[in-house]
Image: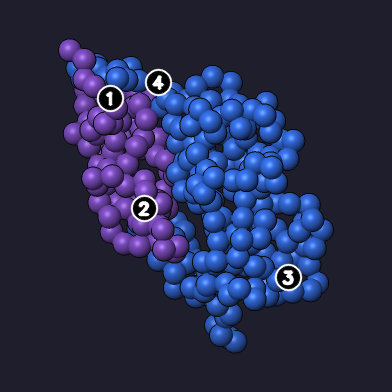
Chain colours: A purple, B blue
């Protein structure tokens, strides 16, 4: 799965960017390589857990600036990978 | 278990590990590690103004380490002649190589120093050596000279090594769609 993000700035290296992620406990910011960003989303693999219907736990590809690795997000924040297809 | 040179080559060939630019296997591999080289871009921490000691509080809501480090450091590009890292000086550096570990892989990695540089007092990371499955990017290095003499750093020099390890099982995020219920996903 891919998690929607918003680019908010550049990182410390020319190849780095800083993105913002909307989580259920507030915004998280994350430094990533530019190549990780594709159409304003990043790959996070499969969700790890579900709660209250539409809340999904995902693991970020890098440690967020707050120190968080796993965050709860709304299902609407996730989109399928290009090599994934939706089953019935 | 740690991957040997043979297993590292197989993992690269199967695209479980991606290294760009591709390493010269003949010289970059050792029996249980892969050497990576130094990118010319570095960030050098500024010296404190005498009498002024800034205090960093990472617990402040909205703390942005990139902004803080950006203000505390100067961007430099290591010239061909090299950059002299003084004793007790911390800099941020990166590997020239882009590293990618597939999210579905059973491979993680650790970045470690090289003994030839460690003997001079050069440390290449500060307690954060783990490269998780799903990682994409150059490896950031927190370099400090613990020795007594400046150490000359040159772009492209062998600066660290990656040790690849197999995990016991696939990480949960490497599985597909078990918590998606209504929108079950499968790999094409």
In the image, residue B81 sits, relative to residue A15, either above or below, namely: below
Whether discs 4 and 3 lie on one chain: the answer is yes
What subunit carries mark 3?
B
The secondary structure type at the circle numbered 1 is strand
Q: Earlier in the sequence, mark 4 or mark 3?
A: 3
Instruction: Identify the residue position indicated by label 4 in the image.
Output: B175
Q: Does the residue at mark 2 contact the one at mark 3 (Cβ under 8 Å)?
A: no
Q: CA distance from mark 4 to mark 2?
A: 25 Å
Q: Who's the residue at 74% across and 35% down the image?
A: B31
Q: CA distance from mark 2 to mark 1?
A: 22 Å
Q: Residue B136 vs residue A44: left or right?
A: right
The secondary structure type at the circle numbered 3 is strand
Instruction: Identify the residue position indicated by label 2 in the image.
Output: A34
Instruction: Identify the residue position indicated by label 3 in the image.
Output: B151
Q: CA distance from mark 4 to mark 1?
A: 12 Å
In the image, residue A21 sits, relative to residue B93, either above or below, namely: above
């Amino acid at each position: 799965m891919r998690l929607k993000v918003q680019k908010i700035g550049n990182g410390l290296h020319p190849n780095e960017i800083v993105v913002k992620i909307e989580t259920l406990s507030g915004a998280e910011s994350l430094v990533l390589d530019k190549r990780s960003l594709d159409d304003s989303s990043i790959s996070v693999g499969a969700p790890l857990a579900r709660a209250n219907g539409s809340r999904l736990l995902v693991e970020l590809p890098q440690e967020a600036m707050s120190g968080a690795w796993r965050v709860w997000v709304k299902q609407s924040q996730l989109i399928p990978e290009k090599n994934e297809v939706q089953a019935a | 278990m740690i991957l040997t040179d043979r297993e590292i080559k197989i993992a690269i060939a199967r695209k479980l590990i991606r290294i760009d630019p591709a390493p010269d296997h003949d010289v970059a591999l050792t029996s249980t590690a892969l050497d990576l080289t130094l990118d010319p871009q570095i960030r050098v921490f500024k010296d404190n103004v005498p009498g002024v000691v800034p205090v960093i509080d990472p617990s402040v809501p909205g703390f942005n380490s990139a902004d803080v480090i950006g203000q505390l450091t100067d961007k430099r590009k290591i010239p061909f002649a090299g950059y002299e890292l003084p004793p007790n000086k911390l800099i941020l550096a990166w590997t020239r190589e882009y590293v990618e570990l597939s999210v579905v892989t059973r491979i993680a990695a650790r970045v470690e120093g090289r003994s030839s540089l460690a003997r001079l007092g050069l440390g290449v990371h500060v307690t954060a050596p783990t490269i998780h499955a799903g990682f994409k990017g150059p490896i950031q290095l927190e370099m400090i000279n613990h020795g007594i003499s400046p150490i000359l750093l040159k772009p492209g020099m062998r600066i660290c090594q990656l040790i690849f390890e197999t995990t016991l099982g696939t990480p949960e995020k490497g599985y597909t769609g078990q918590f998606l219920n209504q929108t079950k996903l499968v790999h094409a």
